Image (cartoon, rainbow, N blue to C red):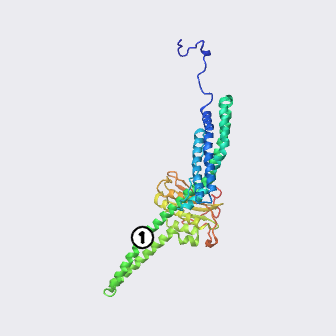
Amino acid sequence: MTVSSGAHSPGSDLLPPPAAFAFGRHTWKEVVHLLLDLPAALLGFVYAVVSVVLGTGLAVTVVGLPLLAAGLMGARWIGSWERARARVLLGVQVEEPSPLRAGREQDGFFPWLWATLKDPVGWRSVLYSVIRLPWGVLTFTLTLVSLIVLWPVLGYVVRGLANVDRAMVRGLLSPSGELERRIAELESDRGVVVDTAAADLRRIERDLHDGAQARLVALAMGLGLAKEKLLDDPETAAQMVGEAHGEVKLALQELRDLARGIHPAVLTDRGLDAALSAIASRCTVPVKVNADLDERPAEAIEGIAYFTVSELLQNVSKHSGARTATVEVWRSGARLLIQVRDDGRGGARLDGGTGMAGLADRLGAVDGLFTVDSPPGAGTTVTAELPWRERTSAGAGAPAGRGRSVGKRSARGGENPRKGR
């Protein structure tokens, strides 16, 4: 009998419900994971025991330690496979540990061997494979019995066992949290430092080759010609010597500018306040400098602060269209804070091609921070933070000074209102 849509058949209440699984897909994925525990645990246990026992037992021979190192590298692969299985079937999102950096800095067999033998990720994977065998037997047995006999409570049993599996994966196969994150950050920062140092060396080489070196070569040629004319044409020789004297002055000025770009003498002799005042005086925009420091930081931090302000003031001169700018430097606890403000057109961005991205990378390499607040038409405020490190006695030098300024003297005195923000 055909019943039209919406009509009610007298016998429809007697029809059985449509066929469906009693549990949701998440429960069945957990069942599959628990049933796979036993074969996976068997393979992992055999591999871990054989590789560790053979490697340890043969440690007195030539092949023992390399065999153990190879076993640990294989254990890393087992741990990666177990993380992937837990991710798919249990929904456990566990980050992959940092790759083994054996032999990256030092080429050779023994650096690789030592780095692999002390790899904590490999040893945790071995431990996971060993303790999984009794647990895999238990989970396989309970899950199979629940499927056949304890059907009504299958969901509860499976969820409890799966939660223990999740805890084991997170506890033994996950990276060691803060340590792994810190290692990744340091690896990235090291790359930034290396690239920055290489770029600085290329810049110095280019400046020497194209500037002072070319001028000194021309000077040597001019003096050679003057020497040849000294007896025959003394007046021309004297004129050429005078020109050479001018070339010497220009070469000296270029060398001073190059040395200032590497590390200015005023920074070493008089500290950050005087050095910032010097670069502010060369800015095309009137700049007020207020350096409120009772003591000088470490030389490396002082140099980074100097070049950060120098780069920012160059951006103010070239791109901001500002009429005035302000540089403030002060210490807040264990941080050295720098703030450069201008009243220009704004709109500055880290990816705007003005070198700010490079500054952010350089500060990040020493655990610093770099923020840009530049709404269009409302000026730009750049705030940089550096870790405060105490200056060694060898570099104590002159006192830092307080509150000197360029262009317009600061009216705030010693206490900076931004302290404690």
The relative height of residue 391 versus residue 120 in the rendered view (above or below) is below
Instruction: Name the quadrant containing residue 328.
Output: bottom right
Query: Vertically, is 134 above or below 111?
Result: above
Q: Nearer the viewer, residue 397 or 106?
A: 106
Q: Residue 93 location, x and y as percent?
A: 60, 43
Q: Residue at x 62, y 33 (%)?
A: 27
Q: Position of residue 367 (x, y in %)?
A: 59, 58
**Residue at (66, 38) in percent of width and height:** 139
Indicate the position of residue 341 as horizontal and vertical percent values: 54, 58
Q: Is residue 112 visible?
A: yes
Marks counted in the figure total 1
Q: Nearer the viewer, residue 245 or 122?
A: 122
Most foreground residue, 23 or 66: 66
- For the residue pair 243 and 30, the one nearer the viewer reads as 30
Q: Is residue 367 visible?
A: no
Q: Is residue 160 above or below residue 387?
A: above
| Residue denoted by label 1 | 209
| Residue 182 x/y as whole percent | 60, 55
User: Where 188 sits versus 261, above or below?
Assistant: above
Is 343 on the left-hand or right-hand side of 164?
left
The residue lying at 67 percent from left, 46 percent from top is: 131
Instruction: Tell me the crowding category of disc 1: few under 14, some 14 to 19, or many 20 or more residues within 10 angstroms, Cα based.
Output: few
